[in-house]
Amino acid sequence: MLSLMVLAAVAGATPPPMTHYVGIANPWFRALPSHLPAGGYFELRNTGQWTANLTAVDSPACGMLMMHKSEQKSGMDTMTDVSSVEIPAGQTVKFAPGSYHLMCMEPGPTVKPGNSVPVTLKFSDGSAATVRFAVRTATGH
Ligand SMILES: [Cu+2]
């Protein structure tokens, strides 16, 4: 009886899809010369009351698109693969130079300044959002 009531309470609090309460702001890629990997930057704003997790990214413009985190370890700049990024309720997580970023491993011909390219962000509940990333130069223009 008690467990049924708990289940009912949980079911009543079922959160909406994560894409309904996580906003994506200021998305852009930094294009480098010679088809070097392009860093992708944006902000995730969780306006809901539930934790959200970004678990995968994909773009037809990039060959492989990865999630990375830059960190300083023992004075060295390192970059590690990230499989999931948590966005706590009410918080903003910034993908920015020196921190979390996307890495467009094989930028195709559309990844050039002045263009925009689609990126799909997938969340842990299976919801996904596709947004266009503006492509800027190495200096951010
Ligand atoms: Cu990287």
Image: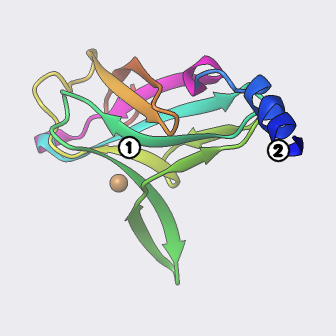
Does residue 136 lie above or below 38 as drawn? above
Side of 119 where 69 appears, left or right: right
* Residue with the most extreme right position: 2
Question: What residue sits right under mark 2 in the picture?
Answer: 3
Q: Nearer the viewer, residue 35 or 68?
A: 68
The answer to whether one can see residue 14 in this image is yes
Question: What residue sits right under mark 1 in the picture?
Answer: 102
Q: Nearer the viewer, residue 97 or 56?
A: 56
* Residue with the most extreme bottom position: 74
- Does 19 appear in magenta? yes
Q: Nearer the viewer, residue 64 or 139?
A: 64
Magenta part of the chain = 18-34
Q: Report how far apart the C-alphas of labels 2 and 1 lie in the structure.
A: 43 Å
Q: Residue at x 47, y 26 (%)?
A: 127
The answer to whether one can see residue 135 in this image is no
Where is residue 10 shown, x and y percent of the image? 78, 34
Label 1 CB sits under 8 Å from any ligand 1 atom: yes
Q: Quadrant of ligand 1?
A: bottom left
Side of 140 where 60 appears, left or right: left
Q: Residue at x 52, y 84 (%)?
A: 74
Q: Residue at x 80, y 29 (%)?
A: 8
The kind of residue on which mark 2 rests is Ser
